[in-house]
Image: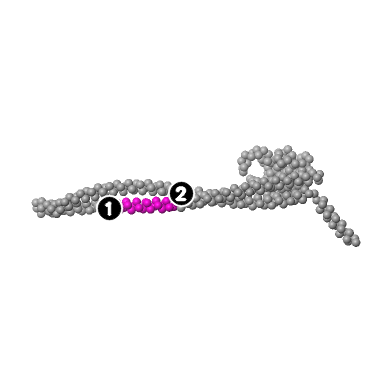
């Protein structure tokens, strides 16, 4: 009987314990799970975006190289066209001379043909003696030989020029073929670039949407955390926040407008505290952790809701020692200093957020 009573009491106690868990804690756990899932999706999307960006850079490099090749070939084609034009002018000039020589030769042959053998005989018979006869025969032979040499020389020159012209045209055709091939290659690369750019935009839009969903979930988590802190009597009600990095008090960059090495001119949403890598980061006040994960440009970050609309953010951590949904006490070590996210070296980025708006932390520390 006693054993049965103990079992009944255990069951009742378990039910009471279950029923005693506030609804906002159950909802907070659900939200934190959703945030973790969305963070995982965002991380995957950022990885894909980085891959596409790398592919785009690679293709742009190939396009630049192809354009350089095209420019070089265009110069060669232009130079060859100049050579061909000059060669064509020389060929026309040489051909004109050849035609003139041919006309002269044709004229002499026609005259000799009209005279026939009589003209040739008359040249011989007009000789007064054997010496003059031999001289006249030698002169006629020389005329024929000279004309023949003229024809052979001009023909050789013409054929040489014609061969050179053919070679130059073949070279020009080869260059144009190469140009056509490279132009087609450039066109293919440009199409690939357009496809990748479209893909990049799609992924970026998806990442932006996920980031927005994460922000909404985090806002809801903050509200739930504030509700939880209020109901437990631990809400922030004013007073100084504890310095978040006990080992260092040097502020390397204050709150307000600055020239950021990553984003240009922008409003710095907190203060940067110089510290050695691995130094302890402590909670500025008691509260509930709403973020303990990679958080955009802040890298590994912790965000704590202290109630009363006040939250604190600790960015660029090397290690996170708390988890989302966990309640922490003022001064508790929550993370270690690092240089994750958009960071130029080990330091702690510390922000104070009041009702969703970043305010100067120095007014609270």
x, y (%) of residue 208?
64, 46
The residue beneath circle 1 is 155
Quadrant of res 306: top right
In the rendered structure, find residue 70 and report the number of the disc placed on it. 2
Q: Residue at x 63, y 51 (%)?
A: 45
Element marked by disc 2: helix
User: Does residue 69 belong to the magenta stretch?
Assistant: no
The span picked out in magenta is 154-180
Side of 119 where 31 appears, left or right: right
x, y (%) of residue 150?
24, 51
User: Does residue 166 belong to the magenta stretch?
Assistant: yes
x, y (%) of residue 49?
60, 50
Q: Residue at x 66, y 40 (%)?
A: 268
x, y (%) of residue 64?
50, 48
Q: Residue furthest front?
A: 114
Q: Residue at x 80, y 49 (%)?
A: 22
**Magenta span main SS:** helix
Label 1, label 2: how many angstroms apart (C-alpha)?
39 Å
């Amino acid at each position: 009987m006693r054993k049965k009573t103990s079992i009944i009491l255990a069951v009742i106690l378990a039910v009471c314990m279950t029923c005693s868990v506030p609804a906002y804690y159950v909802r907070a756990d659900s939200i934190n799970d959703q945030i973790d899932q969305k963070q995982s999706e965002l991380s995957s999307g950022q990885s894909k975006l980085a891959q596409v960006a790398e592919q785009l850079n690679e293709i742009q490099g190939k396009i630049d190289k192809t354009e350089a090749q095209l420019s070089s070939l265009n110069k060669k084609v232009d130079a060859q066209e100049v050579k061909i034009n000059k060669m064509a002018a020389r060929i026309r000039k040489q051909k004109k001379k050849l035609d003139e020589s041919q006309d002269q030769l044709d004229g002499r042959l026609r005259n000799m043909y009209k005279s026939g053998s009589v003209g040739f005989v008359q040249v011989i018979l007009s000789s007064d003696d054997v010496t003059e006869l031999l001289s006249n025969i030698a002169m006629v032979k020389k005329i024929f030989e000279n004309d023949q040499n003229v024809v052979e020389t001009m023909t050789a020159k013409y054929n040489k020029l014609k061969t050179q012209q053919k070679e130059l045209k073949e070279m020009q055709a080869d260059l144009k073929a190469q140009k056509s091939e490279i132009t087609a290659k450039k066109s293919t690369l440009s199409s690939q670039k357009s496809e990748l750019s479209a893909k990049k935009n799609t992924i970026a839009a998806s990442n932006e949407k996920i980031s927005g969903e994460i922000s909404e979930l985090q806002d809801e988590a903050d509200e739930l955390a504030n509700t939880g802190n209020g109901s437990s009597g631990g809400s922030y009600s004013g007073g100084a926040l504890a310095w978040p990095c006990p080992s260092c008090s040097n502020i390397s960059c204050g709150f307000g407008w600055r020239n950021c090495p990553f984003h240009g001119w922008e409003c710095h949403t907190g203060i940067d505290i110089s510290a050695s890598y691995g130094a302890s980061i402590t909670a500025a006040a008691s509260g509930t952790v709403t973020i303990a994960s990679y958080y955009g440009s802040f890298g590994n970050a912790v965000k704590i809701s202290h109630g009363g609309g006040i939250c604190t953010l600790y960015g660029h951590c090397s290690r996170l020692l708390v988890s989302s949904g966990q309640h922490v006490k003022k001064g508790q070590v929550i993370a270690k200093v690092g240089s994750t996210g958009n960071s130029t070296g080990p330091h702690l980025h510390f922000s104070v957020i009041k009702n969703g708006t970043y305010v100067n932390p120095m007014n609270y520390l």
